[in-house]
């Protein structure tokens, strides 16, 4: 049974930091490209950061470059997202996604991903 569980969200002041975690089970984590996505109220889900199965290639949306860092821990089958310099516009539900792919990561497209968690809410206050 595939499980993808996000955690670490919360209410944070602008310019603050947060680390999101995604714990997975039920599939071979090492064989999957992983990504973080977010969806703000009234907006479509968008990819913010994705990482290849080896961890050797990553993609970041322009809006988060230099502030977000994606990482993966193969021993724990977990994905992380370090967020620094939070902005009001980062407020959204953040989701972890999994894609069975051994390709180099060049994009972070929602439609490609198959396994999803329930999300963790990040709210940034001024």
Image (cartoon, rainbow, N blue to C red):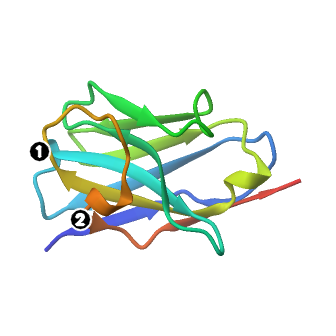
Label 1, residues with CA under 10 Å away: few <14, some 14-19, many ≥20 = some
Label 2, residues with CA under 10 Å away: few <14, some 14-19, many ≥20 = few
Q: Position of residue 92 (x, y in %)?
A: 63, 63
Report whether 105 appears left or right of 59: left
Give the quadrant of residue 121.
bottom right
Residue labelled with disc 1: 31
2 vs 1, front mark:
2
Residue sitting at x 25%, y 36%: 52
Give the quadrant of residue 74.
top left
Q: Nearer the viewer, residue 85 or 7?
A: 85
Residue sitting at x 36%, y 65%: 5
Please tell me the numbered disc located at residue 58: none
Residue sitting at x 59%, y 59%: 9
Q: Position of residue 105 (x, y in %)?
A: 28, 35
Q: Position of residue 95 (x, y in %)?
A: 45, 62
Please count the marks in the image. 2
Q: Nearer the viewer, residue 76 or 122?
A: 122
Secondary structure type for disc 1: helix
Label 2 to label 1, Cα distance in Å? 13 Å
Q: Give the residue furthest to the right.
A: 126
Q: Is residue 126 above or below residue 93?
A: above
Report whether 126 appears left or right of 96: right
Q: Is residue 44 above or below residue 53?
A: below
Residue labelled with disc 2: 114
Question: Sequence-wise, which precedes: disc 2 or disc 1?
Answer: 1
Secondary structure type for disc 2: loop
Residue sitting at x 27%, y 30%: 55
Q: Position of residue 119 (x, y in %)?
A: 47, 68
């Amino acid at each position: 049974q595939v499980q993808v569980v996000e955690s670490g969200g919360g209410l944070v002041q602008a310019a603050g930091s947060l680390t999101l975690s995604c714990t997975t089970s039920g599939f071979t984590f090492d064989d999957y490209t992983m990504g973080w996505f977010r969806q703000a109220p009234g907006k479509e889900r968008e990819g913010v950061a994705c990482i290849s199965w080896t961890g050797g290639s990553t993609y970041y949306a322009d809006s988060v470059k230099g502030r977000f860092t994606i990482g993966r821990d193969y021993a724990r089958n977990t994905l992380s997202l370090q967020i620094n310099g939070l902005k009001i516009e980062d407020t959204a539900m953040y989701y972890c996604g999994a894609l069975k792919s051994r390709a180099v990561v060049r994009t972070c497209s929602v439609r490609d991903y198959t396994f999803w968690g329930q999300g963790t809410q990040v709210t940034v206050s001024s």
